[in-house]
Image (spheres, rainbow, N blue to C red):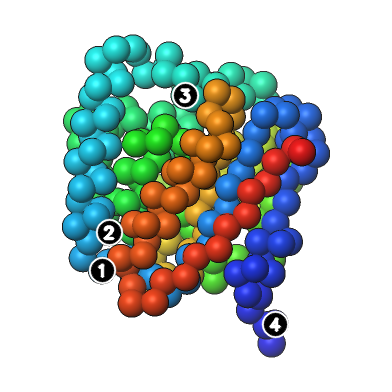
Amino acid sequence: MRETPTAEEFLASCAVDPAVFALRPDYRALLVVAEGIDPSAPSSVADDLIARAEEHARTLLAGAPVDELPHIAAWREAYRAFGAKPQRTRNSLEALTRRADKGLPRINSLTDAYNAICVLHQIPLGGEDLDAYAGPARLARAAGDEPFETFADGAPVVEHPEPGEVIWHDDAGVTCRRWNWRQGPRTALTPTTTRALFILDALAPVSDAELLSAADDLVEALSGLGGDVRTVRRLLAAN
């Protein structure tokens, strides 16, 4: 039986392929692992974050169209660089910011908190079940034959990314397509998740300090979702 890696071992083996940094040298990924969490634990912090995020989105959108908000515009440019059409496949930050104006979706305390932090800090943020991973998380440009297990019309299907598409993957296949567009159900958070991986994505003009601040808020929110929550993090950058 394969031993479960510690959070530190898992993070140490995660990587971003040089081809991704060649596409966007300003890219940084901040990975946060949280252990001992209860996704459905009641949290007034999550409720407060949702309210603040919705108000922040309304303020931002009153001053500029969503596609002109600085970090969203940067991600649209990044999508075009590997051949994706951002008006058809919106990154997670843009999709949530558009929804937040009229109200963010409510799922459970864990998902609500990280969705709110995504909007508040204007940084794409994804959450996944660490125990569903097969090997470390790696960001790369796809060959085009990698399996992506998903659903279509309620039935399980296997899709494949476009060659050159930026994907997160593990040893079993794609975990998220088009950088931060569509996560796969295989590694999705569930009500029974106790160990989670969070990926915070940043491009210029977002600074390292702003990226770390978003992670700090995430860790603070997670600390209320269990009696003994533990977090570790690692920053992946070109330098």
User: Which structural element holds mark 3?
Assistant: helix
Q: Amino acid at mark 1?
A: Ala
Foreground: disc 4 or disc 1: 1
Which label was assigned to residue 2?
4
Point out the tag, 3 or 4, that comes first from the N-terminus: 4
Residue 32 vs 209, above or below: the answer is below
Q: Earlier in the sequence, mark 2 or mark 3?
A: 3
Say which element carries label 2. helix
Please rate how many residues cluster around mark 3, counting C-alpha atoms within 10 Å: few if below 14, some from 14 to 19, many from 20: many
**Secondary structure state at the residue bearing disc 1:** loop
Mark sitting earlier along the chain (4/2): 4
Question: Is 73 placed above or below 55 here?
Answer: above
Would you say residue 83 is visible in this rendering? no
Separation (CA) of disc 4 from disc 2:
31 Å
In the image, what residue type sits under mark 3? Ile
Question: Mark 3 — residue?
Answer: 72
In space, the residues marked 3 and 1 are separated at their CA atoms by: 31 Å
Q: Which mark is residue 41?
A: 1
* Residue 238, image quadrant: top right
* Residue in the foreground of this view, choosing between 228 and 27: 228
Give the residue displayed 57% in from the left and 37% down from the top: 208
User: Where does label 2 land, which residue?
Assistant: 109
Which residue appears at 35% of the width and 36% of the height?
119
- List x then y, in percent, for residue 204: 59, 25
Q: What whole-number distance in Å separates the C-alpha atoms at marks 3 and 4?
A: 40 Å
